[in-house]
Amino acid sequence: RKEVEQDPGPFNVPEGATVAFNCTYSNSASQSFFWYRQDCRKEPKLLMSVYSSGNEDGRFTAQLNRASQYISLLIRDSKLSDSATYLCVVNGYSGAGSYQLTFGKGTKLSVIP
Amino acid sequence: ETGVTQTPRHLVMGMTNKKSLKCEQHLGHNAMYWYKQSAKKPLELMFVYSLEERVENNSVPSRFSPECPNSSHLFLHLHTLQPEDSALYLCASSQDMQGGYNEQFFGPGTRLTVL
């Protein structure tokens, strides 16, 4: 089983639509979870951190289900500027008191006028 | 913009060349990372430095050689690379590596092409 698994998409949605991305992870000892956004040929940028069962930031809602080892990202009222690749990222213990990020391959979103 | 800068932004080199990638973070962080991002693959962690000491080397070939002279600077020295090493090389930093809640901040990357 891949460490962090995402549907690569692409998800093509019209402006104003609601879209949800799912992510599963294999390391049950993972501590924290993030969604990063990566625009074409740019670096990943932190979109949201998910520390408990989930959190909301404007049009974006992230949810975490530790029992099922599953994270989701919901985007409401999609904008053209939301078009990007969304990376699911899991922070897990790597030994000697250190933690490392493991990245999914990303889900590509295209918001269409 | 994110406090992590990388130079050069683009690099084309032959297989016999020697070049270096540079990363600098202005965030006062103690941990720095090198990642490789190839097409259709997730980001691959290459090296990790914490307080200027290398703490992780993820089975990276010796043709990649990292250097961390201080907590703000990180280099990746390249020599006798292969065409399959062409990728986006990303530097990142975080406050430290302790605890499971550290966010990483990325530089803009160096897009490397090996001919």
Image (tube, rainbow, N blue to C red):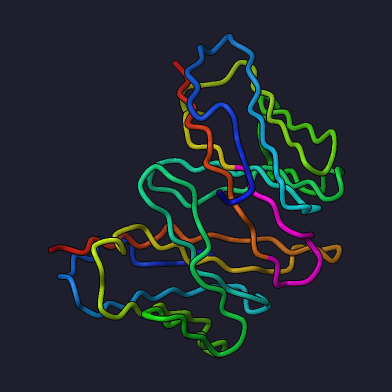
Q: Residue furthest top?
A: B16
Taking the spot 38% from the left edge, 47% from the top edge, the residue there is: B40
Q: Is residue B30 above or below residue B54?
A: below
Is B96 inside the magenta-drawn segment?
yes
The picture places residue B57, in percent across and down from the top left corner, at 74, 43
- Judge by depth and name the residue closer to the eye, A40 or B2: B2
The picture places residue A104, in percent across and down from the top left corner, at 48, 61
The picture places residue A17, in percent across and down from the top left corner, at 20, 78
- Which portion, as a residue range, is magenta? B91-102
Taking the spot 49% from the left edge, 67% from the top edge, the residue there is: A47
Question: Residue B95's image quarter?
Answer: bottom right
Is B87 inside the magenta-drawn segment?
no
Which image quarter is the C terminus of chain A in? bottom left
The picture places residue B87, in percent across and down from the top left corner, at 47, 34
Question: Residue A112's image quarter?
Answer: bottom left
Prevalent SS, magenta region: loop
